[in-house]
Amino acid sequence: MGAAVTSGAATFREQLDAATTTLEAAGVQTARVDAEWLLAGLLGIGRAGVRIDLSRVLSAPLAERYADAVRRRARREPLQRILGWEDFLGLRIRLTEAVLVPRPETEALVEWALTLLPPPGPRRLLALDLGTGSGCIACALAAGRSDLDVVALDVSLAAAAVARDNAHALDLAPRVRVVVADLLEGVRDLSADLIVSNPPYLPTGLVAGLEPEVRSHEPRIALDGGADGLALVRRLAAVGRTCLRRAGVLVVETAGGAQAAAAASLLRGAGFQSVAVRADLAGVDRFVAGNA
Ligand SMILES: C[S@@+](CC[C@H](N)C(=O)[O-])C[C@H]1O[C@@H](n2cnc3c(N)ncnc32)[C@H](O)[C@@H]1O
């Protein structure tokens, strides 16, 4: 496998061309865009900034680092993981190998969840984010409502550390408390207005067939939702109401389609009222909410 140009005084254009060839050979569909992003990340600028003057020359130390970043991407490490961040509802979320790269559809989950909160009033509101990973949902909820406190839960110690770092970096730490817990263990005494979760929801049998970025580089615990993908939703439906105020809301992301319908049935079966399903931007039924 080739690598990006590293020796001599290579221009941005030469670097990008070489990187694009390397990434195409590795099967990366968005080779040119990724080559540009990797260079932009290294320079601390936006992607458009890279293209302003392609005759610029990359210094030797930066060229070495660029070659390293391209090699990582050629091994199909997710672009955002190499950059070290992803933007989520306007928040820069830092990432490590311990957490899932936040997905655009999850932004829609948060936007819907925010509309399901009670209007501002005399008391502070409380939300739980189950399976917080990078903390993207918890931080976006807190950023979206200043009268909201969030408890962000994850069973992974390493993921919880990332979520905590993100809450600090975004100045949201006073309102986003990160707790290591299996499901809702340890927070049963809380009485929340909202529980949000983007749980691991892929059926176990599908994980091996995923693209390499996901299968080989995302934490398995963030993906594998058991035989039908609904293991965590099933558990959450069973105990979620005990952590919700009267008329509090549970809202979850699913793999979409039939799984969303199955999750809706689980919520109804567990006693949730007014269960509703909402489509993502692609028109696929993906999000499910119910009132306690
Ligand atoms: C699909 S990821 C979602 C991460 C993040 N909320 C997002 O939307 O990008 C699911 C997360 O659930 C966590 N998780 C898996 N099983 C769990 C459990 N039993 N209790 C709490 N968290 C769990 C994983 O560690 C992972 O961080």
Image (cartoon, helix red, strand yellow):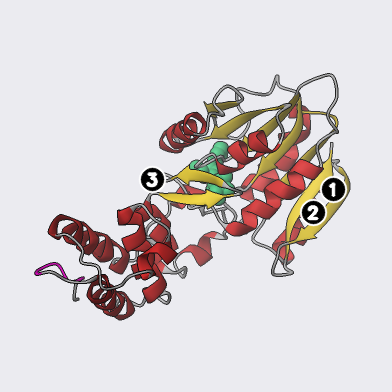
Q: Quadrant of ligand 1?
A: top right
The amino acid marked with disc number 3 is: Thr
Which mark is first along the chain, 1 or 3? 3
The amino acid marked with disc number 2 is: Ala
| Cα distance between the residues tagged 3 and 1 | 37 Å
Residue carrying label 1 = 268
User: Where residue 55 appears, x then y in whole percent?
Assistant: 26, 73
Q: Which residues are magenta?
A: 4-8
Whether label 2 touches label 1, CB < 8 Å: yes
Q: Is residue 156 left or right of residue 258?
A: left
User: Where residue 127 appears, x then y in whole percent?
Assistant: 70, 31
| Cα distance between the residues tagged 2 and 1 | 6 Å
Instruction: Work out whether 50 lies above or below 81.
Output: below
Some atom of ligand 1 lies within 8 Å of the CB belonging to the residue at label 3: no
Q: Is residue 253 visible?
A: no
| Cα distance between the residues tagged 2 and 3 | 33 Å
Disc 2 secondary structure class: helix
Residue at the left extreme, as displayed: 8
Q: Is residue 257 left or right of residue 154?
A: right
Q: Quadrant of the N terminus?
A: bottom left
Residue carrying label 2 = 264
Some atom of ligand 1 lies within 8 Å of the CB belonging to the residue at label 2: no
Q: Nearer the viewer, mark 2 or mark 3?
A: 3
Residue carrying label 3 = 96
The amino acid marked with disc number 1 is: Arg
Whether label 2 touches label 3, CB < 8 Å: no
Q: Nearer the viewer, residue 112 or 62?
A: 62
Q: Residue at x 74, y 69 (%)?
A: 283
Disc 3 secondary structure class: loop
User: Where residue 86 appears, x then y in whole percent?
Assistant: 48, 51
Q: Is residue 271 left or right of residue 133?
A: right
